[in-house]
Image (cartoon, rainbow, N blue to C red):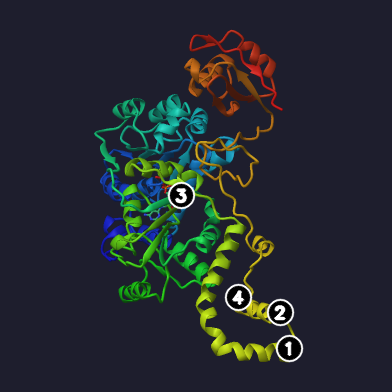
């Protein structure tokens, strides 16, 4: 392994940043990090294109932290993110990576929270401001100088910001930041609207594109399961009950996750061990040898630690955490099915990772079918099957060696053969649940998801929207004092959220803050507006036309 000399340490970052990153359990920079960090450190403008989940946050956060002058207590870096959730995520990531850099202050600025404390936090010396464009523009209206010291600007998820209608806000923000700034733009896609922003506002940007080459996968049986992030360990335990494996390798993203899962497996009696970059080379070789010769059956590894691992006994690969890219997925599952044996690969997918699953399917040209977690009946059947097969060889021989003892015990205990056999079974199975009611009791149902493509609605069994999973989130409850209004104009009329927003702002004379969520559906749209003064507002908008058609906004009563 080479991460002692390569990896984050080789990136020319401040040692305190490297230490904090390693402390969070990252072992190696992801591809987008590896390529972007040197470019940003060198001061170039940059356009980074990569899918969700490839590690874009650290790709800009680490070099920016490296550039911050902690002794200056004024905004130096501005990160724009499309939603409140993402802004908070990015702000939290900055705080994590800056854990060992005292004096770094991060402030998150987003709508739906009072403006005063946000502005005070900026003025009180936050060097890093993470903001949604709408709210930031509100602040600019109050204080046009608030961004005048910013030197680094990042547009995170630029395509999403444009989809949400923030184009005009972005222009205002660009104008409020000194032209000498360094600008970095990250986006999963680069539509022409983004290219045109880049042409106007970036200076000779370097391009980084993490693109997946087509991969061929050998004949390994693959499936995926939808689970919540916090249900992964119970899901793995349940799957292991029914999967007939010889040796298994489970992949996770961090050192801590290798330890957590290995401990959970050992507690259930599996012969399992963790394999991560902290483990010394000789110990690592011992783990692999143990897996080879059967002293271990399960190894929980990070990608780095599993490098070069080749154990023919491996029948199963569990992708407990999503790989960073399809190449590494293909690489991981190639650990099974060695030497012409059968292999099986399972992938756990959390809500926000669905897109990565699609990328994997596209790149490998194969569908990864959806599987369901086994229910209690399946777990019970598997347990009884294991018990049966462990007894089968004994049934043929044990009567000769233990038959007389059995007769004596029935006599001594004065019980039936059935009663004695039952007592022995209970002893042999060591309290394991072996009837349906008991299995159900010990295994609370792990919530899973409705299949891909189906819209999930709030309140559905097991559905818990995850932070950052904004596309699939069910309609948000209305904020206090807001009502929903409806227009019969929708996507099929060529309407986008920004058109509605623009029209209502201009003709209704409302502040950006007053308008809540805008949802554009195919044949209608919903807009959240203040209840106070609604009648007046609707009459002001009476003749408003959007995309050449009458808006006809009406209060919408849902029940
Ligand atoms: P993106 O912005 O590209 O969607 P994120 O920056 O949100 O991706 O990162 C996705 C997940 O991967 C996060 O949980 C993050 O902590 C983790 N992560 C990022 N970089 C690394 C790394 N080098 N090693 C391990 N985990 C990482
Ligand atoms: Mg991101």
Residue identifier under label 2: 419
- Asked if one can make out residue 268 in the rendered structure from this viewpoint, the answer is no
Callouts 2 and 3 close, C-beta under 8 Å = no
Percent coordinates x, y for residue 168 in the rendering: 44, 24
- The secondary element bearing badge 2 is classed as helix
- The secondary element bearing badge 3 is classed as strand
Residue at left 27%, top 49%?
A: 38
Q: Disc number at residue 429?
A: 4
Looking at marks 2 and 3 on the same chain, the residue that comes earlier in the sequence is marked by: 3
Graded by Cα atoms within 10 Å as few (under 14), some (14 to 19) or many (20 or more), the crowding at tag 3 reads some
Graded by Cα atoms within 10 Å as few (under 14), some (14 to 19) or many (20 or more), the crowding at tag 1 reads few
Residue identifier under label 1: 413
- Residue 311 against residue 148 in the figure, above or below: below
Residue at left 32%, top 67%?
A: 311
Looking at marks 4 and 2 on the same chain, the residue that comes earlier in the sequence is marked by: 2
Percent coordinates x, y for residue 476 in the rendering: 61, 35
- The secondary element bearing badge 4 is classed as helix
Q: Distance between the residues labelled 4 and 2?
A: 15 Å
Q: How far apart are marks 3 and 1 (CA)?
A: 52 Å
């Amino acid at each position: 392994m080479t991460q002692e000399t390569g990896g984050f340490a080789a990136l020319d970052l401040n040692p305190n940043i490297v230490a904090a990153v390693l402390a969070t359990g990252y072992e190696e920079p992801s591809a987008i990090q590896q390529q972007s960090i040197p470019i940003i450190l060198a001061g170039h403008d940059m356009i980074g294109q990569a899918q969700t989940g490839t590690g874009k946050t650290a790709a800009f956060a680490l070099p920016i932290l490296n550039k911050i002058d902690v002794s200056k207590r004024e905004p130096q870096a501005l990160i724009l993110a499309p939603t409140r959730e993402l802004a908070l995520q990015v702000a939290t990531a900055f705080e994590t990576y800056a854990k060992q850099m005292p004096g770094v202050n991060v402030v998150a600025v987003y709508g739906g929270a009072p403006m005063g404390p946000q502005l005070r936090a900026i003025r009180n010396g936050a060097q890093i401001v993470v903001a949604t464009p709408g709210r930031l523009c509100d602040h600019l209206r109050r204080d046009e100088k608030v961004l005048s010291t910013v030197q680094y600007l990042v547009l995170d998820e630029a395509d999403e910001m444009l989809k949400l209608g923030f184009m005009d806000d972005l222009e205002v923000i660009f104008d409020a930041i000194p032209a000498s700034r360094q600008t970095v733009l990250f986006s999963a896609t680069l539509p022409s609207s983004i290219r045109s922003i880049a042409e106007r506002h970036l200076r000779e940007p370097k391009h980084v594109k993490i693109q997946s080459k087509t991969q061929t996968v050998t004949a390994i049986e693959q499936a995926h399961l939808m689970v919540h992030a916090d249900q992964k360990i119970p899901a793995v335990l349940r799957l292991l009950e029914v999967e007939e494996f010889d040796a298994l390798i489970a992949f996770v993203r961090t050192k801590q996750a290798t330890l957590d899962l290995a401990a959970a497996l050992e507690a259930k009696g599996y012969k399992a061990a963790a394999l991560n970059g902290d483990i010394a080379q000789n110990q690592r070789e011992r783990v692999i040898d143990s897996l080879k010769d059967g002293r271990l059956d399960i190894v929980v590894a990070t990608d780095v630690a599993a490098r070069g691992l080749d154990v023919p006994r491996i029948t199963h690969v569990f992708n407990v955490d999503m790989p960073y890219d399809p190449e590494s997925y293909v690489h991981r599952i190639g650990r099974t099915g060695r030497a012409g044996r059968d292999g099986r690969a399972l992938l756990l997918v959390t809500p926000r990772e669905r897109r990565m699953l699609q990328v994997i399917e596209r790149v490998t040209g194969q569908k990864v079918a959806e599987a369901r977690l086994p229910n209690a009946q399946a777990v019970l059947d598997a347990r009884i099957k294991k018990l049966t097969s462990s007894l089968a060889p004994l049934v043929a021989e044990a009567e000769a060696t233990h038959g007389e003892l059995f007769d004596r015990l029935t006599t001594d205990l004065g019980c039936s053969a059935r009663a004695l056999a039952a007592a022995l079974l209970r002893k042999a199975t060591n309290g394991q649940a072996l009837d349906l009611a008991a299995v159900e009791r010990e295994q609370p149902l792990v919530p899973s998801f409705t299949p891909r493509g189906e819209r999930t609605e709030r309140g559905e069994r097991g559905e818990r929207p995850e932070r950052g999973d904004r596309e699939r989130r069910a309609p948000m409850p209305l904020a206090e004092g807001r009502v929903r209004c409806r227009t019969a104009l929708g996507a099929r009329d060529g309407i986008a959220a920004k058109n509605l927003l623009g029209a209502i702002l201009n003709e209704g004379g409302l502040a950006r803050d007053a308008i809540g969520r805008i949802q554009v559906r195919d044949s209608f749209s919903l807009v959240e507006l203040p209840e106070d003064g609604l009648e007046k507002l609707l009459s002001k908008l009476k003749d408003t036309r959007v995309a050449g058609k009458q808006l006809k906004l009406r209060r919408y009563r849902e029940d």
